[in-house]
Amino acid sequence: MNTLLSYMQELYAFCKLKLIVNLVLMVFLGLIEGGGVLLLIPLLSLAGIISGVPADGSWAFKVQGLFQVCGLAPTLPVVLGLYIVIIAGQSWLQRSQAICSVAIQQSFTSFLSIRLFRAIAYTRWLFLLSRAKADITHVLTTEVMRVGNGTHFFLQLLATGLIGIIQIGLAFLIAPGLTLFILGGGAVLFICSYPFIRQSRRMGLSISEFTRNLMFEVTEHLNGIKEVKSYGMEPVQIRNFATLRHTIERNFVRFTAVQSHTDFYYKVGAAVFISLFFYTAITFFKLNPQEFVLIVVIFARLWPRFSSFQVGLQYVVMMLPAFKAVLQLERCCLEEQELLLEEQLTTRLELTQGIEFRDVSFCYYAGRFNYAVDGVSVVLAAGTTTAFVGVSGSGKSTMVDLLLGLLTPERGGIFVDGRPLAQSLQVWRQSIGYVPQDSFLWNASIRANLQWACPEASESAMWETLGLAAVDEFVRSLPAGLDTVVGDRGVRLSGGERQRIVLARALLRKPSVLILDEATSSLDTENESRIQQALEDLHGKLTIVVIAHRLSTIRQADRIYVLEQGRVLEQGDYLSLSKNKGGRFAALASVSGTG
Ligand SMILES: Nc1ncnc2c1ncn2[C@@H]1O[C@H](COP(=O)(O)OP(=O)(O)OP(=O)(O)O)[C@@H](O)[C@H]1O
């Protein structure tokens, strides 16, 4: 019930005016339909089915009065002409109302998904790390779409309800006793069908769960498709997928069965009530022929509305778990927002003094004591090259993520030119060029990938940075050159080519700080030394932070920090650290063959 209320509040807050217009159109539709029914009276008289002078106060008398007020004679051409006008008006209104409903449905769906996407985009990295990507994709696509479909049914429900109320009102004016009697029957049926609504809610929940699992299965399968193929695990994957798909299939069939039950239930109910109706109308209510015909026509039209109201209600109830999932994810993301959204994206920061880590500690799991970074105090002076080295798991990437502001220190602080990093996060990130371990490219052309980071970059600037990253010759050799499409995550390129293009993309932004996290790990010796040369050329012009397993790449670093279990074990330049033969760095250097 609460979810339904918050859904209605959200919908109303989003499109008050459109919703009101839609409701007004529905009321008009109801009135016009009622008018069409009343036209039956002169038609029946003209056809000679009903004869005689209408009794004072009867509906035939009132309709006759209405014709007189409008200065029209109820002749056959006039009545039929009016009938055509009413049908044309009704169809036109129906068309406008249908367009208005779809506009509401679509714009509400867009509004919800854009708002959610925005909340996700600005949420903390650590929160995103804790959620499966497939879950987020599922809510952002399937669940939002289900809310959109549910909105369609909700608007239909409103239309059915409003038009129904108007027709019931008309029926009540014609024959109050009989109308109450029939409504009582409808209410009994509605109460008896409550279990179907609860069943729909349960099904809505399980559809949410199974479609999420399906999305998870598909995403995971595609992420790990190379491994799946190389392990020959296709049959297992297909079996898992088929199991999930069949479960969803069964759920939808069950939902349709519930709906058909409702339909069946209402049809049988209709037969019982029609019999009761005729019996009571003829035996107890003693209606005159005009009123009898009008009531029959009104309820013949109204009864299917009862049934479609019920079915619409089931759809809306089935949608509610999807709406709840959308709200829940959005609320979690908003609780974990990291940036001031209104911050300017265009400003950049020119580093003048440097970056300071002051007694920084960070733990991935709150409340645990296995710190990934533990009491680190380091200074990265502006214009220098700093390297972090250490065995796997020593905390190097966590240091980079802290520096990027993706992670927030649990203790201590990071200062950029003396200001806390958290105060100017967005501006800070605008000033960084970052080449991660698993370099990512969009499934687009090399040009588009470069322009993504720097939309205003000229072609010559692109070639210049491609040259700096030692990848210009390779790009020139491609048949479509800069316009070559690189495939999913750059899958059509080798690891080294991908890494160099990502490096070019980072340099194209002319960053104040360049961060390379194992950026040369996939390169051959020749290309590595070209990049080495490029970094040496950049030395002093910008602040460079390097993480490297291959210690040959950090020979020129001004300062090297050796990390172990999240702590700084040693620090110095390459030469001084190598000379300390019993030290950790010397041991690492001898293992990597660069000592
Ligand atoms: N997302 C995460 N959730 C939980 N623990 C993590 C996460 N990422 C890293 N860790 C843990 O934090 C510690 C430091 O990891 P980090 O990735 O910073 O090391 P690293 O020195 O960069 O390793 P590598 O050289 O293998 O990339 C490790 O013990 C690791 O298991």
Image (cartoon, helix red, strand yellow):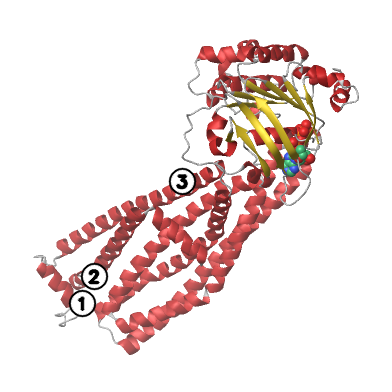
Residue position marked by numbered label 3 in the rendering? 110
Q: Are marks 2 and 1 in contact (CB under 8 Å)?
A: yes
In this rendering, does residue 129 appear at all? yes
Which amino acid type is marked by label 3?
A: Ser
> Which of the two discs, 1 and 3, sits closer to the camera?
3
Q: CA distance from mark 3 to mark 2?
A: 42 Å
Determine the residue positioned at 46% across, 40% down: 342
Depth order, front residue of 61/154: 154
Instruction: Give how far across and how far down residue 65 sits, in percent.
Output: 13, 73
Q: CA distance from mark 2 to mark 1?
A: 8 Å
In this rendering, does residue 229 appear at all? no
Q: Would you call the spot at circle 1 few (<14 residues within 10 Å), some (14-19), or many (20 or more)?
A: some
Residue 37 occupies quadrant:
bottom left
Q: For the view shown, which residue lies furthest in the bottom direction?
A: 284
Q: Is residue 19 left or right of residue 39?
A: right
Which disc number belongs to residue 59?
1
Residue position marked by numbered label 2 in the rendering? 38
Q: Are marks 1 and 3 in contact (CB under 8 Å)?
A: no
